[in-house]
Image (cartoon, coloured by chain):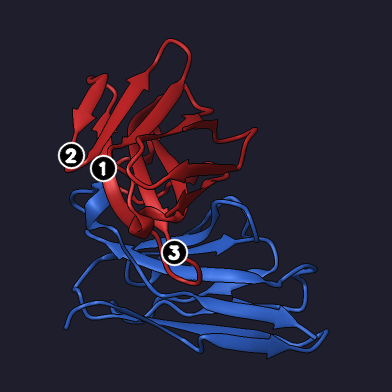
Chain colours: A red, B blue
Amino acid sequence: GESVGLHLPTLSVQEGDNSIINCAYSNSASDYFIWYKQESGKGPQFIIDIRSNMDKRQGQRVTVLLNKTVKHLSLQIAATQPGDSAVYFCAEIPLYSGNTGKLIFGQGTTLQVKP
Amino acid sequence: DGGITQSPKYLFRKEGQNVTLSCEQNLNHDAMYWYRQDPGQGLRLIYYSQIVNDFQKGDIAEGYSVSREKKESFPLTVTSAQKNPTAFYLCASSRSDYFSGNTIYFGEGSWLTVV
């Protein structure tokens, strides 16, 4: 399953399928991007990050792809599990932010995993 | 255990009242942040502080005030000037000498409702 974070806020996938969550970021000066997972009523949890000098980074069951030309970020989750159900946010940090947590968050995509 | 503690978890405010949300961290982090989250939306930065006795406005500071008298504490006051305060408020902290997505710690959040 695939979604564009800004236009399709909910993505529903079958357990075991791969999920692709998309995000269009706003600031061409951003050089650091992060994906967070947020469960209802809790704070965001870090999933994976990527710097602007890379176009792909892999973690455990997750891959982040960065396309700076079109300012697009995606999160791929392999073999989606029920525990992956949550809201997923992309966040960016512009170059001028320095070493601060001045994150700029996207609107988020809700991932629903069907058993 | 090290972490961030926000209180109260749920708070109700009457029209015209000021309320203060507490945020305490024992991570020895220099930097602290307050974010606001509306339903179905990403987080937006209200205020941040990189060092004791210093803080800066974020993107939506109007109607809010903060103080940073101690390293471990960063309370947020929602004043009567904030016309639409009903939201989920998240406090976070990080090191100030180096930032990465997995070194910013978020609290569990506080729900504020105007009644």
Q: Which residue is mark 3?
A: A39
Classify residue B111 as left or right of residue B95. Answer: right
| Label 1 vs label 2, nearer the camera | 2
Numbered tag placed on residue B103 in the rendering: none
Q: Amino acid at mark 1?
A: Ile
Ranked by sequence position, the earlier of labels 2 and 3 is 3
Residue drawn at x 18%, y 79% is B2
At label 2, counting other C-alpha atoms closer than 10 Å, the crowd grade (few under 14, some 14-19, many 20 or more) is few
| Spot occupied by residue A38 in the image (x, y as percentages of width and height) | 43, 59
Q: Which residue is mark 2?
A: A59
Q: Chain of mark 2?
A: A
Cα distance in 3D space between marks 1 and 3 = 16 Å
Ranked by sequence position, the earlier of labels 1 and 3 is 3
**Marks 1 & 2, CB-CB < 8 Å contact:** yes
| Label 1 vs label 3, nearer the camera | 3
Cα distance in 3D space between marks 1 and 2 = 7 Å
Q: Is residue B99 above or below residue A45?
A: above
Dividing the picture into quadrants, the one containing residue B4 is bottom left
Classify residue A88 as left or right of residue A45. Answer: right
Q: Which residue is mark 1?
A: A48
Q: Chain of mark 3?
A: A
Q: Amino acid at mark 2?
A: Gly
Q: Is residue A102 above or below residue B32?
A: above
* Count of residue discs: 3
At label 3, counting other C-alpha atoms closer than 10 Å, the crowd grade (few under 14, some 14-19, many 20 or more) is some
| Spot occupied by residue B80 in the image (x, y as percentages of width and height) | 77, 78
Residue A95 visible in image? no
Dot 1 and dot 2 within a common chain:
yes
Q: Secondary structure at mark 2?
A: loop
Q: Amino acid at mark 3?
A: Glu
